[in-house]
Amino acid sequence: MAKEKKIYVCKVCGATSSKWLGKCPYCGEWNTYEEQIEEKSTHNRKKKKTPAKLVKLEEISGESEKRIPTPINELNRVFGGGIVEGSVVLIAGEPGIGKSTLLLQLALNKDFVPVLYVAGEESLPQIKMRAERLTGADDSKTLFTSEKDIDAILKLIEDSGVKVVIVDSIQTVADSENDFLPGSVSQIKAVTQKIIEFAKENGVAFLLVGHITKEGSVAGPKVLEHMVDAVFNFEGDRNFHYRLLRPFKNRFGATTELAVFEMTGEGLREVTNPSEFLTNDSSGESGIAIGTVLEGYRIFFVEVQALVTPSVYGSPQRVVTGYDPKKLSMLLAVLEKRNKLKLGNKDVFLNITGGIKVSETAIDLAVVAAIISSYFDDPIDENTVFAGEIGLAGEIRPVKKVADRINEAMKLGYKRFVTPKNTNIKNSSYKKIGLTFVNRTYMLFKEVFKHNS
């Protein structure tokens, strides 16, 4: 026999309480607690317990994980070389951003292993209509099902013998032993637990599609992100055609890599050179600077746009897209304090083009250069690249892998690279590009803009 006990679970973070709460004390959300039944067995659990075994480090098998390479190189990069057998990967993103398109392209690629595609949100005829417009689609090996019961799905996987399963989406799959609606905290936890156990026992890799909330976090209990092996966020601006696949957790690879795709009428296209869409020909315009961004082992260039104008609304505006607003406020304070720029009565607008978000500190120097350029209405030469971190004292600090950034700038035809002095970088080593060393923000005025701060 089992005793039933009512508990209340937050559907956002998974926190539990013995009574209903209007506001979750852990995540701060309102009206998120749902009633659930917790069963506690009255049997003696010691009878079911198996003896534990202790092992030493040298007794543990040191075999590396087996990977399934994908025909999409951008996916291989962020996965760390391919999909690991027996892994459970969660791919989350906004509705309509392209999650299903990306995974359907992978499933239908003739160079990939046989895949079972579990269509929980779309009917099979809808899947077929979308597949017919995808480039290179070949469904001869791909199997489809619209089954939503997890036990029935796992039985189909056993019978088919596939090694990769795509579940679109995890919120639509249900466990018949659970009385709650699909998508609830209890259902998502139960379904995911069964998937993980099956994946580890049978070496089957699962790619789960997940919804996100309006705040941008993965929908469902927070414990879902802890249960799976990897969490990737598929993001992008609907006003642009480009999409980014960014890892937030990866037990089998780095979390610093970034995959870039372009959404076309025939599906998603790999973008091997992100700089092609992050920079444009904007020669002769003030307030524009080119900076370098390092994502994992990949270096690409982004265009930073700044607009500094007199404030006509009383309180000066600070409007930022793709950059940390607090960091912008800090840089403006440095310029006003250390270089006497009168920015307190100016509206400042800052934009990172391409719809991406940049957090690396190496972009600071390009941001400051764009602001100075707009302030004096003095254009920066379009063949100039900036890389450096700005400190509160107005000092410009070196960034990592600056030699690799310079080499990449030379490949793309840039003629000038502005960076702080680094003992490992010498002008004689880079004859195809001019190096300008600036260690303080006031040196930018002399070396780049020919002004005295």
Image (cartoon, rainbow, N blue to C red):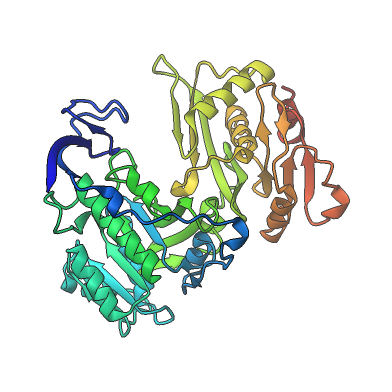
Measured along the vertical axis of the image, is residue 276 above or below residue 29? below
In this view of the protein, which residue sits in the foreground, 317 or 211?
A: 211
Q: What residue do we see at 56% from left, 52% from top?
A: 281
Q: Residue furthest top?
A: 314
Residue 194 coordinates in the image, percent (x, y): 28, 59
Residue 132 visible, this orientation: no
In this view of the protein, which residue sits in the foreground, 191 or 144?
A: 191
Q: What residue do we see at 12% from left, 41% from top?
A: 4
Point out the image quarter for the C terminus.
top right
Q: 195 left or right of 403?
A: left
Q: Residue furthest right?
A: 428
Residue 299 coordinates in the image, percent (x, y): 62, 54
In this view of the protein, which residue sits in the foreground, 322 or 223?
A: 223
Measured along the vertical axis of the image, is residue 377 above or below residue 152? above
Q: What residue do we see at 27% from left, 38% from top?
A: 12
Q: Quadrant of residue 284?
A: top right
Residue 332 visible, this orientation: yes
Residue 430 coordinates in the image, percent (x, y): 82, 54
Q: 129 left or right of 381?
A: left
Q: 115 left or right of 289?
A: left
Q: Quadrant of residue 273?
A: bottom right
Q: Quadrant of residue 419?
A: top right
Q: 250 left or right of 172?
A: right
Residue 212 coordinates in the image, percent (x, y): 30, 46
Counting the numbered discs, the total is: 0
